[in-house]
């Protein structure tokens, strides 16, 4: 407020339900700073959107099930800005997803700052895991697909891994940030897992669900990261072979542990490392897309494509898929054979295939 006198109101993300009251007070000349974490659940105070508004969003939707984080990675401000881990009750989430399904939503992505740490109270009065929540949501007939992000390796539990095998609606795609391939850097980041522990999780996921694919996050140029540390990161990327990757240069966040560390890496070195990582991960993404050629899998069509008569959707691995088809297919799942892999999209043709409902990815065997 001192730096920017034009600002009249500063509120935390957990106080958004109090915004109308705050605005009223500001309008009569009261500047407000309220970044506390209220006891009440903001979701209980926010009116659900109308069916028309939900329908206008399309056939996919994000549903917040968890907020906050207790991990305190040294590069991250989330624990300070979002607070400790809080999970919404199971039936509140089920009710929201049921409303979305009634409005035409067919795919739901459960989101949270650390979503697989979910521990909301179930109808039995006990904390439920994310896997249990997925099992309950899988019972909703009008929801065809389920996803989640973002996960922490330390919360990748056995039942969540098993859910990728046991729940056909749970897509075979996991975003599992690792941030670095160097144990030394992981310790400095306070990630609470080692390189080998991460690789063990990847192995368990692929053993349990052979069709699974992974994406991840990486930070390059973390304080005191050496050339050897960065090579460890490149080697981990080569070993895992991610379907897609998000990568960033380290930048200091005031108030975090890493911002005060010695050994801040020069920007030129960060740029060089980022460029090398980009070449590797983009090659992997291209190779993964190329593997799709000739494969058959279900696509949830979401909207008209760029060309007349074309419809667009997403593969089980979140890749954009374009195909020529009737607009009536929007909002439905149809089987597609991929005939071409473009830079950012897959191009396919509609086919008629009878899937084994117990294993809808059977025809995509070997894709990942």
Image (cartoon, helix red, strand yellow):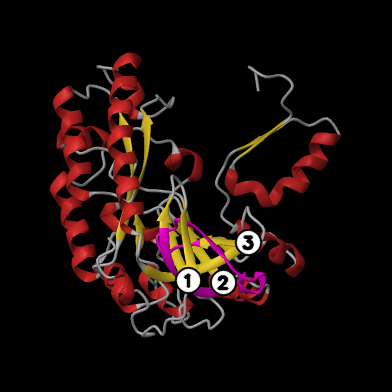
* Disc nearer the start of the sequence (3/2): 2
Of residue 275 and residue 340, the one placed in the foreground of this image is: 340
Q: Is residue 338 left or right of residue 45?
A: left
Mark 1 to mark 3 CA distance (whole Å): 16 Å
Of residue 278 and residue 349, the one placed in the foreground of this image is: 349
Q: State the quadrant of the N terminus.
A: top right
Q: Residue at x 42, y 56 (%)?
A: 340
Q: Is residue 297 left or right of residue 269?
A: right
Query: Mark 2 = which residue?
Result: 106
Residue 56 pos. (x, y %): 72, 62
CB-based contact (under 8 Å), mark 1 and mark 2 = yes
Q: Is residue 345 left or right of residue 92?
A: left
Query: Mark 3 = which residue?
Result: 303
Element type where label 3 sits in the image: strand
> Is 73 a magenta residue?
no
- Can you say whether 340 is above or below 79 in the image? below
Residue density around tag 3, few if under 14, some if 14–19, many if 20 or more, within 10 Å: some
Element type where label 2 sits in the image: loop
Query: Mark 1 = which residue?
Result: 145
The mark closer to the camera, 3 or 2, is 3
Mark 3 to mark 2 CA distance (whole Å): 13 Å
């Amino acid at each position: 407020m001192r730096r920017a006198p034009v600002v009249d109101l500063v509120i935390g993300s957990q106080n958004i339900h109090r915004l109308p009251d705050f605005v009223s007070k500001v309008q009569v000349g009261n500047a407000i700073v309220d970044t506390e974490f209220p006891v009440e659940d903001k979701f209980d105070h926010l009116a659900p959107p109308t069916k028309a508004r939900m329908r206008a969003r399309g056939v996919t939707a994000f549903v917040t099930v968890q907020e906050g984080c207790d991990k305190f990675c040294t590069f991250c401000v989330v624990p300070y800005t979002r607070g400790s881990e809080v999970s919404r009750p199971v039936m509140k989430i089920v009710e929201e997803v049921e409303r979305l399904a009634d409005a035409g939503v067919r795919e739901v992505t459960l989101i949270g700052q650390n979503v697989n740490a979910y521990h909301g109270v179930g109808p039995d009065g006990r904390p439920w895991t994310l896997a249990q929540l997925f099992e309950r949501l899988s019972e909703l007939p009008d929801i065809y697909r389920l996803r989640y992000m973002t996960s922490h390796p330390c919360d990748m539990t056995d039942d969540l891994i098993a859910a990728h095998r046991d729940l056909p609606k749970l897509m075979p795609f996991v975003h599992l940030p690792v941030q670095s391939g160097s144990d030394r850097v992981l310790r400095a980041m306070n990630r609470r897992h080692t390189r080998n522990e991460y690789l063990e999780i990847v192995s368990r996921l692929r053993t349990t669900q052979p069709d699974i694919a992974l994406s991840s996050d990486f930070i390059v140029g973390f304080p005191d990261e050496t050339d050897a540390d960065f090579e460890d990161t490149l080697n981990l990327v080569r070993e895992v072979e991610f379907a897609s990757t998000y990568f960033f240069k380290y930048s200091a966040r005031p108030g975090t542990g890493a911002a005060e560390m010695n050994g801040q890496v020069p920007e030129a070195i960060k740029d060089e490392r980022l460029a090398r990582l980009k070449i590797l991960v983009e090659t992997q993404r291209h190779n993964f897309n190329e593997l799709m050629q000739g494969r058959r899998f279900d696509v949830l069509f979401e909207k008209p494509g760029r060309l007349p008569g074309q419809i667009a959707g997403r593969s089980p691995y979140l890749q954009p898929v374009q195909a020529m088809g009737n607009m009536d297919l929007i909002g439905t799942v149809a089987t597609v054979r991929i005939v071409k892999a473009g830079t950012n999209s897959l191009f396919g043709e509609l086919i008629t295939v009878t899937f084994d409902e117990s294993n809808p990815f059977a025809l995509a065997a070997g894709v990942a």
